[in-house]
Image (tube, rainbow, N blue to C red):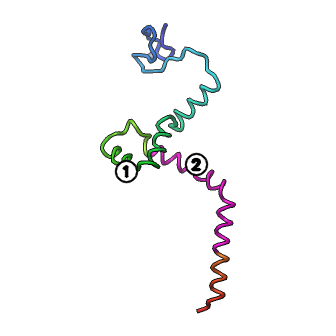
Amino acid sequence: MRCKNCQKPLEKDAHFCNHCGAKIVINRITFKQLISEVFINVFGFDKKFFRTFKEMITQLQVVISDYLNGVRKRYMNSFAFLAVGAALSPIIFNYYADDFIKINSSINSEQKDETRENPT
Ligand SMILES: [Zn+2]
């Protein structure tokens, strides 16, 4: 068998080409496989994202000190993590926008009532 990218001969049962480093794809492309490759390659989403997210919530100081001390492989790239967060935040904000407006307007009306009762 030869590499489909560089045409060099491949070792038996190899998962990657020794010459160009391309991943060897033997199975036909399925929709599920395509979606997972989009998430991994385009968004950098894999187990690392969820691990980073979970540990950012449960033990933030450990993640930060690990990252600063060179433990990079364990966590998602910080700029990619920021980009994912920035991309998700408008979606999350829109989901809660009605509640946010309701809370904000109720706080405003309470303040108006207070200033009416206690004019300085
Ligand atoms: Zn190759």
Q: Secondary structure at mark 2?
A: helix
Q: Is residue 61 above or below residue 113?
A: above
**7 and 61: which is toward the camera:** 61
From the top left corner, tell me how far across and down residue 33 is, in percent: 59, 25
Q: Is residue 5 highlighted in magenta?
A: no
Apparent side of residue 84 relative to residue 70 in the rendered image (left or right): right
Residue 11's spot in the image, x, y percent? 42, 9
The residue range painted magenta reads: 79-107
Above or below 89: residue 13? above
Q: Which residue is farthest front? A: 58
Find residue 108 and report its image quarter: bottom right
Question: Which residue, given by chain and number where applicable, does mark 1 sit on?
Answer: 61
Q: Find out whether residue 95 is within the magenta segment.
A: yes
In three-dimensional space, the C-alpha distance between marks 2 and 1, rounded to whole angstroms, equals: 24 Å
Where on the picture, by quarter, is residue 115? Answer: bottom right
Residue 72 figure quarter: top left
Ligand 1's quadrant is top left
User: Closer to the camera, 53 or 88?
Assistant: 53
**Mark 2 = which residue?**
88
User: Label 1 crowding class (10 Å Cα cut-off): few <14, some 14-19, many 20+?
Assistant: few
Left or right side of 107 for 24: left
Compare residues 47 and 13 and report the one nearer the observer: 47
